[in-house]
Amino acid sequence: MKKRLWLVMLVMALAFGMMVIGCDNGTGTGDLDPALIGTWECCCGGDSYVFDRNGTFGIFENNVRFSYGTWTTSGGILTLQGSFEGMTRTVVFSYTIVGGFLTLDYGDGYIQTFTRRQ
């Protein structure tokens, strides 16, 4: 009985360990969508988002950075944490990338579309 209990505990520990390791998307960061890495320019002009491989971002308006911090993704949700126009906040969007276009849905009816800068 004791051996069986230890075996069950070992299997559960291994399953948990594989679940944690399985969350890595191959970039070594675990929670950054590699498809977002790069510079995205708003289709309406002016704004651009830069997502770096190291998990940092910058938001620029007419080439002037006004927001910066760190970013993560999980299941189509993009989370930005940092300074937004001088205020420390966390901002969450849903996002999709289709055919070179990034769409950010702010959840309040406002949707913004960006194209990848070449």
Image: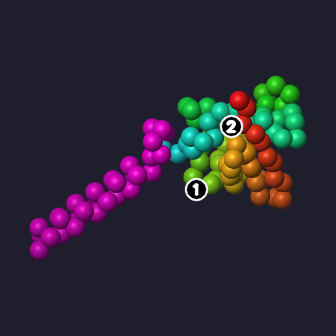
Report whether residue 63 is seen.
yes
Left or right of 50, for residue 11: left
**Could you say where residue 49 lies in the image, as x and y percent from the top left?**
73, 35
| Residues packed near mark 2 inside 10 Å, few (<14), some (14 to 19) or many (20 plus) | some
Range shown magenta: 1-29
Which mark identifies residue 82? 2
- From the top left corner, tell me how far across and down residue 18 is, in percent: 34, 54
In which quadrant is the C terminus drawn?
top right
Going by the numbered disc 1, the residue's amino acid type is Gly
Residue drawn where x is 45% and y is 38% of the image? 28
Q: CA distance from mark 2 to mark 1?
A: 21 Å
Q: Position of residue 78 (x, y in %)?
A: 65, 48
Q: What residue is drawn where x is 56% and y is 40%?
A: 34
- The kind of secondary structure the magenta stretch mainly shows is helix
Please report the residue visible at 69 percent of the width from the left and 47 percent of the height from the top.
Answer: 99
Estimate the x, y position of residue 35 in percent, counting from the top left: 60, 42
Seen in the image, is 97 located left or right of residue 34? right
Q: Which residue is mark 1?
A: 75
